[in-house]
Image (cartoon, grey):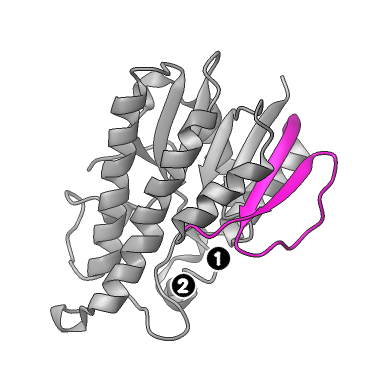
Amino acid sequence: MKKTIAIIGSSGAIGNSICEVLLNEYPIKKLYKFSRKIQSKDTDKIKNIAIDIEDENSIKESLKDIPRDVKFDLIFVATGLLHNENEIFPEKSIKDINIDMFQKVLLVNAIGPALIGKYFIPLLKKDNKSVFAFLSAKVGSISDNKIGGWYSYRASKAALNQIIKNFSIEIRRNNNNAIFVGLQPGTVKSFLSKPFQKNVNSQTLFTPNYSAKKLLKLIDSLDHEDSGKLFSWNGEEIQP
């Protein structure tokens, strides 16, 4: 059966690769690509829609470009922030904690995805399996934290994982076919990981395409008992 899919953050390394793999290897009825900037043209299979996940009004406005009868088999939120070229970076120490930086990271990694859920969850299919997936991170696991640091990023991903769990509990009441998961994509060759790639074994530094294929295979394998959980790219469950 051909699927209708939405990718939020389609211009990022992983989001873009997810779109390419879907279009090349999956039976797609329609792919809705959401990003801050429109970078490609619409086709019979592709609809590009502008969105800013840091702006609730922008999220609401983006829904106007989706026909009212559309319901999604998969909604994939591929956005995230660890650092930028200027003022945002992972904190190595308590003294690096900064209110503006902390608020920005929380906004992008937790509040934005929560708002996406608020407006997009009603668009999930109810008559068969549907998946709402969010890019998360293993460093958001409190039990796995052995070295500290990265205060805002760790906190934002832990918050996201809690939001995903909340979604899975609340939506079960009126959509038993919906599955909510957080996904750890591995260390991917991208802007997000670039400053840290020298510390990563080359065999565990993935291309975006490789990670995308692994994540989509994992999504295909999910069942309802998996809802609310966090999984690594290889299918391993990551404990909170």
Corner quadrant of residue 150: bottom left
User: Outermost residue toward the right?
Assistant: 44
Q: Residues within 10 Å of mark 2 (few under 14, many from 20)?
A: some
Q: Residues within 10 Å of mark 1 (few under 14, many from 20)?
A: some
Residue found 57% across the figure and 33% down from its top:
74
Q: Secondary structure at mark 1?
A: loop
Amino acid type, mark 2: Gln
Q: What is the magenta range?
A: 26-53
In the picture, the disc for residue 197 is: 2
Q: Quick check: 225 left or right of 219? A: left
36 is within the stretch colored magenta: yes
Please tell me which residue lies in front, 9 or 229.
9
82 is within the stretch colored magenta: no
Residue found 38% across the figure and 58% down from its top:
109
Corner quadrant of residue 68: top right
What x and y, as percent, mark residue 133?
Answer: 47, 39
What x and y, as percent, mark residue 53?
Answer: 48, 57
Q: Is label 2 in contact with label 1 (beta carbons under 8 Å)?
A: yes
Q: Quick check: 70 left or right of 39? A: left
Amino acid type, mark 1: Lys
Query: Label 1 belongs to which residue?
Result: 189
Mark 2 vs mark 1, CA separation in Å: 8 Å
What x and y, as percent, mark residue 116?
Answer: 46, 46
Kindly tell me whether residue 75 is visible in this rendering.
Answer: yes
Lower sequence index among marks 2 and 1: 1
